[in-house]
Image: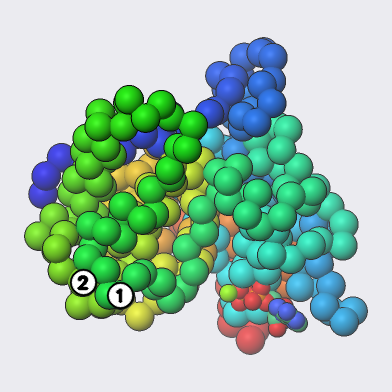
């Protein structure tokens, strides 16, 4: 396969202020990562008619980390993503992007603009449009640019689309209508569309669902290539997929009944008696 496209570059262009671990002055509108944390949840509670879908959930994700989240159905994983993206307001608790952006005070579009991209389970691509155009349409348009720079910018934009196509392994499909792609290809295209917006944090809810084994491993490859350039939170049931992402040292968070049940390497959590009980006890 071709070299992983130069995606680290455009993604890194997003305004991240501060160097992890070093003191600095926060800049308004930028994500302050001076403490090395991209996402911080503390004691987040969400109730639906008295039922606690999230119950004092606390977790944090480091800048550049690829965090896998597992847990039985109904554990609150999707609800957590709803809270992070502003779809659901928590009853209580803190939800921060970096040190300074309080996500509970922002609506969904503002949170997306702040740098959080979300991949839902079903692919939502523009089926009638060619793959290339899907990426073009998804690209952020910088309205403030001087018109005289437009030609050069368009070339830069084209280069980014080419790079993203290579990263997605969809170079050969650029001119095909997205509706003709396989399920796995559509899922990768949608991730590419999110990447065009240069997210600081990408949330993926069961991205491997419905994929063949080959498609699942291609998706794992893609996410592993993105590691470091973009922070990611991946909710998934497929354990082989989780193993491909977490490796021996990656942190895996296990959720159950609305809070964190266990946290550690995949091996550690798989052998944790409370985790085994939570899966088997259902
Ligand atoms: P997971 O994604 O881990 O399977 P969810 O976050 O979808 O879990 O759901 C957690 C719990 O909250 C479930 O019991 C679910 O039925 C309930 N729930 C989720 N959304 C709503 C809602 N909008 N209204 C009522 N109950 C909900
Ligand atoms: Mg879910």
Image location of residue 236, percent across then percent down:
47, 68
Q: Give the number of the disc on residue 127.
A: 1
Q: How many marks?
A: 2
How far from the left and from the top, in percent, is residue 262? Answer: 64, 58
**Tag on residue 80?**
none
Placement of 222 over or under 205, stated as above or below: above
Crowd around label 1: few <14 · some 14–19 · many ≥20 (10 Å): some
In the image, residue 55 lies at what x, y percent? Answer: 81, 65
Residue at 35% x, 80% y is 210
Front-most of residues 56 and 97 = 97
Position of 87 relative to 66 (above/below): below
Q: Circles 1 and 2: CB distance less than 8 Å?
A: yes
Tell me which residue sits at (30%, 75%) in the image: 127
* Side of 42 relative to 149 (left or right): right
Q: Is residue 92 visible?
A: yes
User: Split into 4 quadrants, where in the image is the C terminus?
Assistant: bottom right
In the depicted view, which residue is nearer to us: 82 or 267?
A: 82
Alpha carbon separation for disc pair 1 and 2: 6 Å
- Element class at badge 1: loop
Q: Is residue 243 left or right of residue 60?
A: left
Above or below, comparing residue 6 to residue 56 in the picture: above
The residue to which callout 2 is attached is 177
Residue 244 at least partly seen: no
On the image, the x and y values in percent for residue 54 come to 76, 67
User: What color scheme is it?
Assistant: rainbow
**In the picture, residue 52 is in which quadrant?**
bottom right
**187 lies left or right of 12:** left
Please give the name of the residue rendered at 74% of the width and 50% of the height, measured from the top-left corner: 106
At 87% from the left and 82% from the top, the residue drawn is 49
Q: Quadrant of residue 241?
A: bottom left
- Specify which label sits upstream in the sequence, 1 or 2: 1
């Amino acid at each position: 396969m071709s070299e992983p496209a130069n995606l680290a570059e455009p993604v890194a262009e997003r305004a991240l202020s501060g160097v992890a671990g070093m003191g600095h002055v926060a800049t308004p509108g930028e994500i302050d990562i001076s403490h090395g944390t991209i996402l911080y949840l503390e004691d987040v509670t969400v109730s639906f008619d008295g039922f606690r879908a999230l119950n004092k959930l606390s977790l944090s994700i480091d800048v550049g980390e690829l965090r896998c989240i597992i847990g039985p159905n109904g554990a609150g994983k999707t609800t957590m993503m709803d809270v992070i993206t502003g779809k659901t307001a928590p009853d209580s608790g803190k939800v921060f992007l970096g040190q300074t952006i309080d996500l509970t005070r922002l609506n969904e579009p503002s949170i997306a603009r702040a740098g959080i991209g979300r991949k839902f389970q079903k692919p939502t691509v523009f089926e009638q449009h060619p793959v290339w155009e899907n990426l073009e349409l998804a690209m952020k348009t910088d309205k403030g640019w001087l018109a005289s720079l437009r030609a050069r910018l368009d070339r830069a934009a084209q280069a980014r689309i080419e790079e993203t196509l290579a990263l997605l392994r969809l170079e050969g499909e650029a001119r095909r209508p997205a509706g003709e792609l396989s399920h796995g290809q559509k899922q990768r295209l949608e991730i590419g569309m999110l990447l065009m917006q240069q997210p600081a944090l990408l949330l993926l809810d069961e991205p491997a669902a419905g994929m063949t084994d080959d498609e699942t491993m291609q998706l794992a490859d893609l996410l592993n290539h993105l590691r470091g350039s973009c922070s990611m939170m991946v909710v998934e049931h497929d354990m082989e997929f989780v193993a491909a992402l977490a490796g021996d040292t990656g942190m895996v968070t296990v959720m159950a009944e609305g809070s964190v049940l266990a946290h550690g390497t995949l091996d550690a959590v798989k052998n944790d008696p409370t985790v085994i009980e939570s899966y088997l006890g259902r």
